[in-house]
Amino acid sequence: MADVEELDDDAIAAQWEAEMAADGAGDGADGEDMASEWEAMTDKEDDATTGVVGRVLNQDEIDSLLGFDGDDSDGEDRNGIKAMINSALVSYERLPMLEIVFDRLVRMMTTSLRNFTSDNVEVSLDNITSVRFGDYLNSIPLPAILAVHRAEEWDNYGLFTVDSNLIYSIVDVLLGGRRGTAAMRIEGRPYTTIERSLVERMIEVVLEDMSAAFEPLSPVTFKLDRMETNPRFAAIARPANAAILVRLRIDMEDRGGRIELALPYATLEPIRELLLQMFMGEKFGRDSIWENHLATELWNTEIPIEAVLDEQAITLGEVMNFHVGQTVMLNCGPDANIRMRCGTVNLLNGRMGRLGNKISVRISDNIKGTARV
């Protein structure tokens, strides 16, 4: 009996192994079929999208899509996602007269810096934009010199930023550097006293020109307040406040650099109405021709004048009981003062008299102001 049971167990085990092997072979075949089917579907999708899935964007296409085209200070309009983001940052009114003022400043600076450096200097205006003051401070490339100046008549401040290229170029020109050689630029060290003094003299020349450029619009005096190298110490407005940013390019043959002017809108607020003009001397809401025509017509207008002999306060019932032939007594004598009235405005005083068969009033004086009854 024991031998029979062992044989039955061996047979059952062998049968079980055979069934397991058959199942494993079937699963493997199904897995291979599914993998091949999935690969075929993927190839069909790639063919249906005409190769879009397999195409990789290069760096120029990615920069164009995101709106990053390298140098943002070239004055070109931004596009892509960056333009969509920045479009809602600063939305302030355009100031047409400000462009005329800075065009005038460019011409003056060209002459003044030529006299200051005794070299051939060309000043050009890159662009005028509106920015957040905090974003501008964070975007200043260091090292740089920041000159804080004060507009005395407007009782507010502005900021000049001189980049390192212009600093070394000015130092090289004023100290007799040779032409045709680029200014030596040494990074990693603070500016010396001589460099700061020379840049300060240049800033004072620019501030005098800026005062002269604003003078036809509004007399103002710009004075240098202090010079800083850390943007944190040059904060003249809150980070969220809007400001006008003017980028100027100064070229001295093969040398030069940039100078940037940041004016918060709060600084320009005293002359905002003047900056909104399209041309110098524009009058908002006024037309001298129409004013003269209106004044002429007003002088020829006929208006009714009433001579008030007396005024009494009576009840409505008494008025309703008036009848034909009733006499109303007036407290007015021959020498009583008569008031001449147009509508509800008292105009003149006079004396009652007679001219022929008509009662007349002789004007004695006029009533100053517009006294209403």
Image: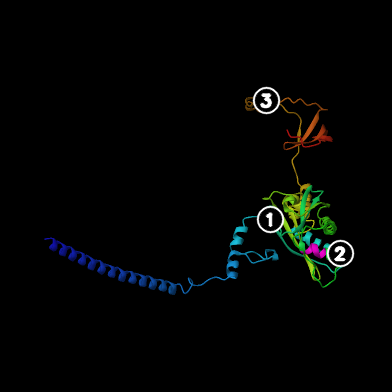
**How far is disc 1 from disc 3 in space, using C-alphas?**
79 Å
User: With 306 as the anchor, is 50 left or right in this view?
Assistant: left
Residue at the disc numbered 3: 314
Q: Position of residue 268 (x, y in %)?
A: 75, 51
Residue at the disc numbered 1: 138
Q: Give the mark nearer the N terminus: 1 vs 2.
A: 1
Q: Residue furthest left?
A: 1
Q: Residue at x 78, y 33 (%)?
A: 339
Q: Position of residue 258 (x, y in %)?
A: 76, 63
Q: Residue at x 44, y 73 (%)?
A: 46
Residue 167 inside the magenta-drawn segment: yes
Q: Residues within 10 Å of mark 1 (few under 14, many from 20)?
A: few
- Can residue 278 be seen here? The reply is no
**Amino acid marked by disc 3:** Ile
Q: Dominant secondary structure of the magenta stretch?
A: helix
Residue at the disc numbered 2: 174
* Disc 1 and disc 2 in contact, CB within 8 angstroms: no
- Can residue 254 be seen here? The reply is yes
Q: Which residues are magenta?
A: 165-170
**Amino acid marked by disc 1:** Asn
